[in-house]
Amino acid sequence: MANTTNGTTGGGAEDIEAGRERWQRRYDAARKRDADFTSLSGRRLEPVYGPPPGSVEPGFERIGWPGEFPFTRGLHPTGYRGRAWTIRQFAGFGNARQTNERYKMILASGGGGLSVAFDMPTLMGHDSDSPHALGEVGHCGVAIDSVADMDLLFDGIPLGGTTTSMTISGPAVPAFCMYLVAAERQGVDTGTLNGTLQTDIFKEYIAQKEWLYPPEPQLRLIGDLMEYCAENIPAYKPLSVSGYHIREAGATAAQELAYTLADGFGYVELGLSRGLEIDSFAPGLSFFFDAHIDFFEEIAKFRAARRIWARWMRDVYGAASEKSQWLRFHTQTAGVSLTAQQPYNNVVRTAVEALAAVLGGTNSLHTNALDETLALPTEQAAEIALRTQQVIMEETGVVNVADPLGGSWYLESLTDEIEAEAERIFAHIRSMGGGDGAEHAIGPMTSGILAGIENGYFSSEIAESAFQYQQALEKGEKRIVGVNAHTATVSGELDILRIGHEVEREQRRALTERRAARDGAAVERALADLLAGVRAGAGAGGGKAPNLVPLIMEAARAEATLGEICATMGEEFGTYTEAPRF
C-alpha cells in the first residue's frame, strides 16, 4: 500500500498510479515560469517521466515523484519549471570597494545572488594590520575589518532584496553581526533578510583547518546563532553544512556525502539540545557540495543526499514538516579538478560539472573560472564562468523536465550504492561516540564527530583516499587531459589577476583612521559586555547563558573590529591546536 501519510509511493501498479495522480495535483497547483518548455525542434515535453501506466517497479518508493518524500527526484513537483537554480557566483578580492564593483558586474550580467569570498586574515579572525595578516590582505578574498567595510562591500546593493551567502566559519558569527548592522544602516528590516552563512565548524576541524576556538565554544556560538535566526530572521539560513572543502581535501564522493550529512545531523542535535523545536530551525539548515568531474557519480551523490536527509530527519529526529525534511544545497564546481596545464580545458571541466549539479537538482550554483588554479579570476574569466551557467539554463533544455535521468538503471543503482556506503560511515561515526547506549552532552552523532576529530579519523580517511587517487594518476590508471594524457599544446600563458601591495597598505591606513575616529569608550564598553556574556556561559549546551549575537552586534555598531571581537571572546574560549599525527 502507498504510505499516503508521508506521500510515499510503493512499487505496485496501483501505488505508482496513485503517486502519479498526487504529483499531478501538486504540479497543477504550483506556480510555473512563463517559458517555452519544448525541445529545440519544437517537441512537446512532459514535466516529468515515470514508469509506464500499469507497470510494477519494485523499490519505486525509493525513487518516487518530484516533490514527494523521500525527495530523491527533487524538492518541488515542478523541478526547474517552477524556478531555475540561483546563479550565485563566489567572488571577493582586494578591498571592499573593488569587490563591490565585481558584485555589481555579476548582478548586471544576470547573477541571481551574491556569495562573499573573504581573505585569509578575515577567515582567521585577524584584522588587516595584524602581524598574522602580513602579505595576505585581499589575496584570496575581500578584507573585512569592521562594519565600515561591510557598508562599502554592499554599497548600492539593497540587502533587503538580494540574497547573500557568506563563506566563513570560525569568525562567522561576528561577520554575520556586521552584515546585520550594515543592513540596519541601509534602513532594512533585518527580520526580512534572506541568505546563507556557512558557519560549519565541523568541516574546519575535518578538512579546511580554519578555526579560532576549540569545538565546544564554537558550538556555543553556532547554537546562539541558530536560536537568534529562528526567533528573529526566519528566512535566513544560519548554517550551510559544507562538503565542498571535504571533497577538495581528497575525500571520495561517498565520504563527502557521509561526513557532510553527519555534520548536519550534529547541528540538528545541537539545536535540539538548546530546546529548539526541530520544525522551527531545521528549515534554516542548508548544504554546500562539490560537483566533481565523474558525471554520473556526482548526480547520484546529490540524489542520495536528499533521500538520506529526508529519512533521517523524519525517522530519527522527528521532523514533521516537509521543509524540515528538505535538503537544500548550493553547489560549486570542483576547484581541485582545474589544472594549470592547458587551462582552457577548465572551461570544459566546469561545464560538465555544472551540468551534473543541475541534473542532480542543485538549488544554487557557482561555476569556477578557468584561471582559478593560478589566481583569483579576471573579469573576463569570471564572465565566461557566469555564461557557462546561462548557456546550460537557456540553451540545453535541461530545465524542461524534472529529474530527467530518474529511473536510469545505472543511475539508480549508483544512487543506492552511495547511500549504502554513507549509512555504513554513519554507523561507524556514531560508534566512535559510544552510540545510543552512552550519555551525550548534545547527541550521539555529535559525540562521534567530536571523537573522530580528536582521534584523527576524518583526516586519516581523507588522506588515504587522496593518496590512492594520486597513486592511480601516477600509474596512469586515472587520466587528466593536459597533465598525464594529451600533453602537447599550442596554448600560451594566461594573463592573471594580481593583487598589489597597495591594497594592504590602503586597508591598513583606512583601519587606522577608523580606530582614531570612533568612540573608543563605547568600543571598550561593548567589548567588556561581550566578555562578561562569554564568561557567563557554560559551554555548548548551556541553556542559561546569554545569547552572544546581540552583544556582538553592539560591538559591531560601535565599530569594534573583527580582530577585537574575536580576541575578546578568545580570552575565555581559548585557542585550538590540532594534535600532530604521523
Image (cartoon, helix red, strand yellow):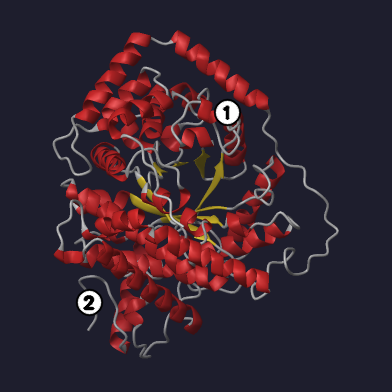
What kind of residue is marked 1? Leu
- The residue depicted at 50 percent of the width and 75 percent of the height is 405
- Up-down relation of residue 389 to residue 555 (above or below): below
What kind of residue is marked 2? Asn
- The reply to whether residue 251 is in sight is no
Q: Residues within 10 Å of mark 2 (few under 14, many from 20)?
A: few
- The reply to whether residue 476 is in sight is yes
- The residue depicted at 13 percent of the width and 36 percent of the height is 544
Q: Quadrant of the N terminus?
A: bottom left
Residue 235: image quadrant is top left
- The residue depicted at 49 percent of the width and 81 percent of the height is 408
Q: Secondary structure at mark 1?
A: loop
Give x and y (percent) for residue 212.
39, 38
Give x and y (percent) for residue 472.
61, 72
- Up-down relation of residue 428 to residue 269 (above or below): below
Residue situated furthest front in the rendering: 582
Between 443 and 362, the residue placed more toward the observer is 443
- The residue depicted at 36 percent of the width and 17 percent of the height is 558
Q: Residues within 10 Å of mark 1 (few under 14, many from 20)?
A: few
Instruction: Name the disc covering residue 3, or none.
Output: 2
Give x and y (percent) for residue 137.
57, 30
Tag nearer the camera, 2 or 1 = 1
Number of on-image labels: 2
Give x and y (percent) for residue 217.
28, 39
Between 152 and 487, the residue placed more toward the observer is 487
Instruction: Name the disc covering residue 272, or none.
Output: none
Q: Secondary structure at mark 2?
A: loop
Residue 501: image quadrant is top right
The residue that label 1 is drawn on is: 134
Between 205 and 102, the residue placed more toward the observer is 205
Residue situated furthest bottom in the rendering: 55
